[in-house]
Amino acid sequence: MRDFPARRPGLAKLAREVGKFGSVGAVAYAVQLGTTNLLWSVAGAAPLTGQVVGTLCSIAVAFVGNRFWTFSDRARTGYGRETVLFLTMNGVGMLIQLACLGVSVYVLDLDGPLARNVAGNVVGVGLGTFFRFFSYRTWVFPEQPERPENPSREPVP
């Protein structure tokens, strides 16, 4: 079992990325959950407003953690490009969360604290997380380009 990384390097790398992504996500989730619930309970914010503000706070935490730790070995394609794509993908992830919360509150009329948390912070965050992981790996922080084995650019016989 110890030679697993040597036999399956792609799977081992994916497992490392999932672990790091999960660690960063756990911290960002705690920020989002705390902020959202504080806004709902103390500030009396509307369901979707609290969810948006909490998610925006967690996006800032997630960007720093994912760019500089989770995907630190991937290609650096420019801070501006990565930031715009990261925010765009998180916007889609947030829309997934808001859709889950909106259906619960405004369609199913489930509007208690437990229902809001289950819909927005469990189901919505869970579905959004799958989307975010895939999009970060694919578009925001792409793989390093393959380097030719012959750096002199001479044809290999």
Image (cartoon, rainbow, N blue to C red):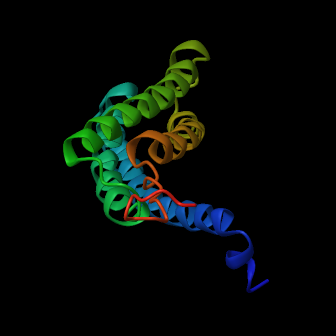
Task: Residue 152 in the image: state x and y as whole percent.
Answer: 37, 64
Quarter placement of the C terminus = bottom right
95 or 48, nearer to the observer: 95
> Which residue: 45% across, 45% down?
136
Q: Is residue 126 left or right of residue 80?
A: right
Residue most extreme to the top = 107
Looking at the image, the residue that sits furthest to the front is 157
Residue 81 x %, y %: 25, 39
Quarter holding the N terminus is bottom right
Q: Taking 40 as reference, is 155 left or right?
A: right
Q: Is residue 95 above or below residue 150?
A: above
Quarter location, residue 134: top right
Corner quadrant of residue 43: top left
Residue at screen point 68% across, 63% down: 11
Q: Above or below — where is 131 with respect to 9?
A: above
Which residue is at 56% across, 68% downward?
16
Report how many numbered discs are placed on residues in the image: 0
Q: Nearer the viewer, residue 95 or 149?
A: 149
| Observer-nearest of 54 and 43 | 54
Residue at 29% in and 33% down: 44
Drawn side of residue 97 relative to residue 12, left or right: left
Residue 123 place in picture, x, y as percent:
60, 38
x, y percent for residue 46: 34, 26
Residue at the far left in the pictured view? 80
